[in-house]
Image: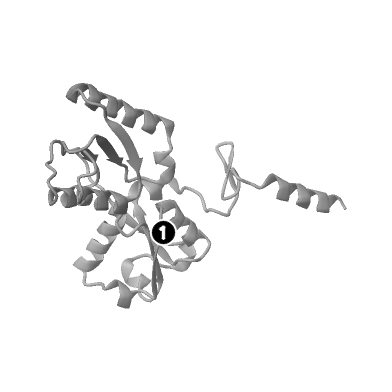
């Protein structure tokens, strides 16, 4: 916490769909309202997924209060912020590969293409820390290392064979319950890419061609 500004940053380290979830937004706003009433001053809520921006702005004291992952808080402490509360629990990053790739452990990913979320995201920090702990140097161990803005983007790149293995946090990985292009029918839904945004005009053209 820092009293130099009136902005509140809630840094949520989940997938993008969670950030846009109405219940989550309402919970963050309720917390901001509680802080505002407690300190007797207006509090502006800023919800973001970009840790790079958060890290940069802690250096200038842009935010009054931070609710963020440990590595963002660790940086903030160097620039005059003080910890006032913490939440129990832990974060876990997992490496994900397609079943057909036969990559079942990190040793089998040598020489492959690695996909990571934003360079300053918590999953990337944890993934790099794990690899450093076992002596893996990214540039020499992997054929290619790429970064995506969001974790969902990393999983999508894996699904279209742009990456061989990607690192995401465990909750994001658990949400990926069906292959992205299988079109599986389960629980009354069709699961797969394109089932929500299916470009109706394109489907109309294809349907018309079938009738010709």
Instruction: Name the residue furthest right.
Output: 212
Q: Residues within 10 Å of mark 1 (few under 14, many from 20)?
A: some
Q: Quadrant of the N terminus?
A: top left
- Report how many numbered discs are placed on residues in the image: 1
Q: Is residue 111 above or below residue 169?
A: below
Q: Is residue 41 above or below residue 74?
A: above
Q: Which one is nearer the viewer's eye here, 212 or 45? A: 45
Which residue is drawn at the image coordinates 76% and 47% (left, top)? 204
Pinpoint residue 27: horizontal percent, then vertical percent.
33, 29
Pinpoint residue 60: horizontal percent, then vertical percent.
20, 49
Q: Which one is nearer the viewer's eye here, 117 or 30? A: 30
Q: Secondary structure at mark 1?
A: loop
Q: Is residue 132 above or below residue 155?
A: below
Pinpoint residue 71: horizontal percent, then vertical percent.
21, 52
Instruction: Tell me which colouring the rendered structure shows.
Output: one colour
**Badge 1 is on which residue?**
148
* Residue 134 left/right relative to 186: left
Which residue is drawn at the image coordinates 18% and 25% (left, top)? 39
Pinpoint residue 182: horizontal percent, then vertical percent.
58, 53
Determine which quarter of the picture holds residue 103. bottom left
Which residue is drawn at the image coordinates 46% and 67% (left, top)? 101
Q: Is residue 147 above or below residue 64?
A: below
Which residue is drawn at the image coordinates 26% and 27% (left, top)? 42
């Amino acid at each position: 916490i820092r009293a130099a500004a009136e902005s509140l940053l809630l840094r949520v380290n989940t997938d993008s769909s969670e950030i846009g979830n109405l219940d989550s937004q309402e919970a963050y706003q309720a917390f901001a309202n509680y802080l505002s009433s407690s300190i007797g001053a207006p509090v502006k809520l800023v919800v973001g997924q970009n840790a790079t921006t958060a890290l940069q702005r802690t250096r200038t004291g842009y935010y009054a209060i931070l609710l963020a992952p440990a590595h963002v808080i660790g940086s903030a402490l160097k620039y005059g912020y003080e910890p006032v509360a913490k939440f129990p629990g832990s974060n876990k990053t997992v490496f994900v590969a397609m079943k057909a790739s036969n990559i079942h452990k990190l040793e089998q990913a040598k020489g492959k293409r690695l996909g990571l979320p934003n360079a300053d995201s918590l999953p990337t920090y944890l993934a790099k820390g794990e690899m450093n702990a076992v002596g893996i140097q990214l540039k020499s161990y992997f054929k290619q290392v790429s970064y995506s803005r969001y974790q969902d983007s990393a999983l999508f790149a894996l699904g279209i064979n742009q990456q061989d293995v990607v690192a995401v946090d465990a909750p994001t990985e658990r949400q990926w319950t069906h292959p992205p292009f299988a079109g599986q029918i389960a629980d009354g839904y069709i699961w797969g890419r394109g089932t929500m945004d299916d470009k109706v005009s394109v489907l109309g053209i294809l349907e018309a061609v079938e009738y010709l």
